[in-house]
């Protein structure tokens, strides 16, 4: 039997049946590993090979010491109160006494009391997408749930067409969501709200004050982490796609990936989810939606924290987001110091990208060597934008002159903050199609590239290419 070097704690299970329900996974027949993240295995303290852990991760055996449970939560979906949701196809195996404590969760492990009309299954396509995204976000330095890997088995699942059933072995600091608190608030269960908040403080913020001060600390930590996470998404061009309150981690980790997308041509109104008709979760809406979601959480916490304190804490969201975004963008522009006119310079740059229809990621690399090597940027820009491009190059040149380091410092800063490898939709699609045909090597190779995205690897140029024409036909939706 494979071993863990740290014990299961099952701290969440110990809270009892108000918060979750014991449930056993439905085994995945004839399982195979599609992807395995050795770094994640190490962080979990797993001792053994991937194959040793396969029956445990495919729901065929129960991990000795774990207490599998489906968690209950509710949430606002697309701006509307959706009532009770819960783990309809996910099972929390338990939490480990690692530092920090980590949850292991099987997504796609079968029906639970919260499945409603769903089949409890996840398909290979969506598990691969979540696996790749969690590697990519972590690679970019953005907090995210992780995944030990993806297992596929011989069980057909009906979506738009017949697909293969798979399980994503998700690892996260918490599986508690904003909707976990909303659930008890809307049921008028203040005692459970207290219990849940006390559990979070003991587990995630053991040094926090006790009582109301502690609850306020919890909310403030959530506001700060959420603002920082969303600022980082905006800087790297990531759109989550389904920012419902049940998909927002209490600890500000990017969580529950569905129809997400990395923006390619710079367009602030980019909508990654084909089912999002109104653009509620469009790229440029994300900062506002983050605040909307935190307001929903604040409302749910109102029996624990005075409203004036909740409002004051919510007031910290925007400055944190703006400040964090400015720090990311400055570095992406190769600037090592903060100057007061950086914000207008950044806006000028983004306006140029939008007007010229340039690729968000490749364009930052074209800042290298400016202002001397201005030809490389000018050649990317259509005739109509040449004048504004020249104006930007002059402004950028003036700004660079105020930097302490030589051109070398700018180059290094650009290289360290602009990825060579971006998880473009078409790359994920190629990896999925290869895996569906039985070849798992593309998933592994792409995962390696996007998890170390700033390091160019000779021979791997194909992963650094912009999307081919056929990619414009790709649509991702909520189907998973
Ligand atoms: P999601 O859109 O994946 O965040 O899921 C929203 C809610 O629907 C959660 O309660 C999920 O557990 C549930 N759900 C999604 N897909 C399924 C499925 N195939 N079977 C059962 N429940 C599901
Ligand atoms: Mg969800």
Image: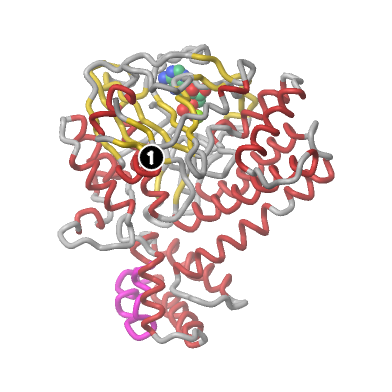
In the rendered image, the quadrant that contains the C terminus is top left
Q: Is residue 187 above or below residue 356?
A: above
Could you tell me residue 71's position as x and y percent? 55, 22
Q: Position of residue 384 (x, y in %)?
A: 39, 70
> Does the stretch in magenta take in 32?
no
Q: Quadrant of residue 454?
A: bottom left
Q: Judge by depth and name the residue closer to the eye, 201 or 127.
A: 201
Where 72 sits versus 325, above or below? above
Figure quadrant of the N terminus: top left
Asked whether mark 1 and ligand 2 are closer than 8 Å, the reply comes as no
Which residue is depicted at the point 57% across and 28% down? 11
Per the image, the residue denoted by label 1 is: 45
Q: How is the image coloured?
A: secondary structure
Residue at horizontal 44%, vertical 63%? 355
Residue 442 position in % (x across, y down): 20, 42
Give the prevailing secondary structure in the magenta stretch.
loop
Q: Is residue 279 left or right of residue 457?
A: right
Tell me where residue 440 sits by quadrant.
top left
Camera-side residue of 139 and 236: 139
> Residue shown at 62%/47% (left/top)?
288
Residue 21 in the figure: left or right of residue 472: right
Vertical placement of 101 versus 385: above or below? above
Nearer to me, 246 or 289: 246
Residue 366 is covered by the magenta coloring: yes
Q: How many marks?
A: 1
Number of other residues with Cα within 10 Å of mark 1, as a class: few under 14, some 14 to 19, many 20 or more? some
Image location (x, y in percent) of residue 336:
49, 76
Q: Which residues are magenta?
A: 364-383
Q: Secondary structure at mark 1?
A: loop
Residue at point 27%, 35% (across, down): 48
């Amino acid at each position: 039997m494979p071993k863990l070097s740290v014990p299961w704690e099952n701290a969440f299970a110990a809270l009892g049946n108000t918060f979750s329900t014991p449930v056993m996974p439905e085994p995945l027949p004839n399982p195979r590993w599609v992807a395995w993240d050795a770094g994640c295995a190490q962080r979990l303290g797993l001792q053994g090979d991937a194959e040793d852990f396969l029956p445990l991760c495919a729901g065929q055996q129960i991990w000795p010491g774990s207490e599998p449970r489906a968690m209950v939560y509710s949430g606002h979906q697309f701006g509307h109160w959706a009532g009770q949701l819960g783990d309809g196809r996910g099972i929390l195996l338990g939490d480990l006494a690692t530092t920090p404590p980590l949850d292991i969760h099987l997504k796609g492990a079968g029906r639970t009391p919260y499945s409603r009309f769903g089949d409890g299954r996840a398909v290979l396509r969506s598990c691969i997408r979540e696996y790749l995204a969690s590697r990519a976000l972590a690679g970019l330095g953005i907090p995210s749930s992780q995944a030990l890997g993806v297992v596929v088995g011989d069980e057909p699942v009906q979506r738009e067409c017949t697909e293969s059933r798979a399980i994503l072995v998700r690892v996260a600091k918490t599986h508690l969501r904003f909707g976990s608190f909303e659930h008890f608030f809307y049921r008028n269960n203040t005692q459970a709200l207290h219990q849940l908040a006390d559990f979070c403080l003991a587990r995630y913020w053991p040094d926090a004050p006790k009582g109301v001060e502690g609850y306020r600390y919890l909310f403030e930590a959530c506001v700060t982490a959420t603002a920082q996470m969303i600022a980082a998404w905006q800087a790297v061009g990531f759109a989550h796609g389904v920012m419902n309150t049940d998909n927002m981690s209490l600890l500000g980790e990017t969580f529950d990936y569905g129809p997400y997308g990395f923006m390619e041509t710079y367009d602030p109104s980019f909508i990654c989810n084909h089912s999002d008709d109104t653009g509620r979760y469009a790229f440029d809406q994300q900062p506002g939606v983050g605040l909307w979601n935190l307001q929903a959480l604040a409302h749910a916490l109102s029996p624990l924290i005075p409203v004036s304190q909740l409002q004051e804490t919510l007031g910290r969201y925007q400055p944190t987001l703006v400040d964090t975004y400015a720090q990311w963008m400055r570095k992406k522009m190769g600037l090592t110091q903060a100057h007061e006119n950086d914000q207008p310079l950044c806006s000028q740059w983004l306006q140029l990208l939008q007007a010229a229809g340039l690729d968000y990621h490749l364009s930052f690399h074209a800042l290298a060597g400016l202002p001397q090597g201005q030809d490389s940027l000018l050649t990317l820009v259509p005739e109509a934008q040449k004048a504004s491009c020249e104006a930007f190059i002059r402004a950028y040149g003036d700004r660079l002159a105020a930097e302490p380091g030589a051109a070398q410092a700018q180059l290094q800063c650009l290289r360290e903050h602009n990825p060579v490898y971006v998880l473009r939709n078409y790359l994920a699609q190629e990896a999925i199609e290869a895996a569906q045909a039985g070849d798992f090597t593309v998933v592994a190779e792409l995962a390696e590239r996007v998890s170390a995205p700033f390091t160019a690897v000779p021979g791997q140029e194909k992963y650094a290419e912009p999307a081919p024409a056929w990619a414009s036909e790709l649509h991702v939706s909520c189907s998973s």
